[in-house]
Image (cartoon, coloured by chain):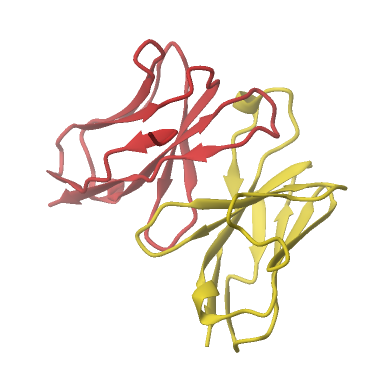
Chain colours: A red, B yellow
Amino acid sequence: RKEVEQDPGPFNVPEGATVAFNCTYSNSASQSFFWYRQDCRKEPKLLMSVYSSGNEDGRFTAQLNRASQYISLLIRDSKLSDSATYLCVVTPGYSSASKIIFGSGTRLSIRP
Amino acid sequence: GAVVSQHPSRVICKSGTSVKIECRSLDFQATTMFWYRQFPKKSLMLMATSNEGSKATYEQGVEKDKFLINHASLTLSTLTVTSAHPEDSSFYICSARANSRSVRDSPLHFGNGTRLTVT
């Protein structure tokens, strides 16, 4: 089993729709979780951190479910510019030197 | 603005030559930096963890003599692809995060990547 797994997609949804995807992780001791966004042929950019209490940033909501070992990303009122690959990132430890584990990414395509 | 600068952004070289890629943290110190490579439509693959003042830690299957890493200061790590071959053609990305007690306080920031083409 992979340490971090994501549905590769692609998710193809109309503009304005709400879309959600999950990321599961195998290490129950994982401590930090993030969502990154990567546009084609570009570097990943931090979208948001994921906290135990869940967090929201505009149209984006991230949640953590420790019991089931997954994190989720919800995008409301999707825009064409949301089309990208969304990477789930999990860090097993607290230290800034801790290894970082990436999911393989979920491709999202928003159509007009 | 960019907090991690990677240079060059694009390089084309002949087979057998060596290519050096630089990764700089611009406004923070990073004891640890990470080097990834990514093939088209594939996920990021961690190649090695660069540690300031000590040897890099390579992932399984990554040749340390092929991909030389030097992390001479708290703001600079370099990756040298030695004796490059066409199969080394890829997108190489570095990342760094500020030294901090907590990972949550210092998310990972990426350089803008280097697209290497070996002819």
Percent coordinates x, y for residue B26 in the rendering: 73, 51
Percent coordinates x, y for residue A37 in the rendering: 41, 45
Left/right of residue A21 with respect to residue B44 in the rendered view: left
Number of numbered labels in the structure image: 0
Which residue occupies 74% across, 45% down? B27
Left/right of residue B117 with respect to residue A85 in the rendered view: right
Left/right of residue B90 with respect to residue A21 in the rendered view: right
**Foreground pick, A80 / A37:** A37
**Foreground pick, A69 / A71:** A69
Which residue occupies 48% across, 17% down? A28
Percent coordinates x, y for residue A62 in the rendering: 37, 24
- In the image, residue B83 above or below residue B70: below
Which residue occupies 42% across, 34% down? A4
Left/right of residue A38 with respect to residue B51 in the rendered view: left
Q: Quadrant of residue A100?
A: top right
Percent coordinates x, y for residue B110 in the rendering: 58, 50
Q: Quadrant of residue B92?
A: bottom right
Q: Is residue B30 visible?
A: no
Q: Is residue B38 visible?
A: yes
- In the image, residue B45 above or below residue A70: below
**Foreground pick, A59 / B30:** B30
- In the image, residue A15 above or below residue A72: below
- In the image, residue B37 above or below residue B90: above
